[in-house]
Amino acid sequence: MSITKLDQLLEVVKSKGRKRLVAAYANDEHTIEAVYNAVQAGIVDATLVGDEATIANVCQAHGFDMSKFRIVQEADENKAGAVAVGLINKGEGDVLMKGLLSTDKYMRAILNKETGLMPGPKAVLSHVTVIETPKYHKLIVCGDVAIIPAPDLNQKIAITNYLIKTAQSLQIEKPKVALLAATEQMLPAMQACVDAAIIAKMADRGQIKGAFVDGPLGLDVAINQESAQIKKLNSTVAGDADCLLFPNIETGNVFYKSNTKLAGGELGAMVMGAKVPCVLTSRGDSAKTKMYSIALAAISAK
């Protein structure tokens, strides 16, 4: 049975055994709280890389048992990212998490050609977000909203496969993937339509496996059955999409922020394409969002 709520994700991941999480520069209250809750819930064992005195102060202020963590002292933000990645490379972690360090420094540590987490020179890193919104009947797995500004065809193929893999980890046996554009019409002058049509045909021919894939689709027909019926669109995906592939970062970023800031949605998010899932949330995200993100990465980890 597929997971349709983020709280269900927490319950399922608990049953799969603890993963080992390494948090980079975990000096902030939200990160420590989220990781502590994940440890208490039986989802992960955790290593916090950061300033031990700062971590101790946060734990004392909130009544967290500091002994629940392994602490690796590194007070420098840049070095903390590298140390955390190094622990993953040594086999001491299954999931990486961003703490208080900025996204560019976190990504720099992951992308470092000599000491980072890239499995090869052609690997594609992409941000996958799972959104629970009150206006939709199930979770929405979508990307990319945070890393690739204008994905080319090869990057979109990689993102499509990441969306499928994530949806399958949510126990959706054969997810429905909508390749979004401004219209469901096939317009050769619109690159999003061309890329979507190519990827959809690749799926038809078995080059992309494990999902129903269709596009180009407008957002309305992708997630609204009435719109699909009015427009007489015959599609397995239309009106019931599990996954949304955005044509560019602006589209994806506005979509997820609209859902969380205007529609009361909640989310979990991670980076895929590295050696391990990498939790990437905003420094301003709540402990709850970070907890869901930890759970998402844990259920996706090998």
Image (cartoon, grey):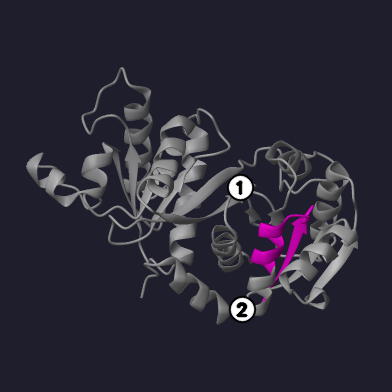
Q: Is residue 26 magenta?
A: yes
Q: Quadrant of residue 292?
A: bottom right
Q: Position of residue 161 (x, y in %)?
A: 48, 49
Against 57, residue 8 (above or below) is below
Q: Quadrant of the N terminus?
A: bottom left
Q: Which residue is mark 1?
A: 284
Q: Is residue 177 left or right of residue 93?
A: left
Q: What kind of element bears circle 1?
A: loop
Against 126, residue 47 (above or below) is below
What is the number of the mark on residue 41?
2
What is the number of the mark on residue 244?
none
Q: Position of residue 151 (x, y in %)?
A: 50, 31
Q: Position of residue 195 (x, y in %)?
A: 38, 31
Which residue occupies the foreground of this view, 195 or 43? 43
Q: Is residue 37 left or right of residue 143?
A: right
Few, some or many residues within 10 Å of mark 2 (<14, 14–19, 20+): some
Q: Residue at x 21, y 51 (%)?
A: 239
Q: Position of residue 282 (x, y in %)?
A: 61, 46
Q: How many numbered marks are there? A: 2
| Cα gap from disc 1 to disc 2, whole angstroms | 23 Å
Q: What kind of element bears circle 2?
A: loop
Magenta segment: 18-35
Against 164, residue 70 (above or below) is below
Q: Is residue 264 magenta?
A: no
Against 293, residue 143 (above or below) is above
Q: Residue at x 68, y 40 (%)?
A: 103
Which residue occupies the foreground of this view, 165 or 280? 280
Q: Residue at x 20, y 49 (%)?
A: 224
Q: What amino acid is found at the position of numbered circle 1 in the picture?
A: Gly
Q: What amino acid is found at the position of numbered circle 2 in the picture?
A: Ala
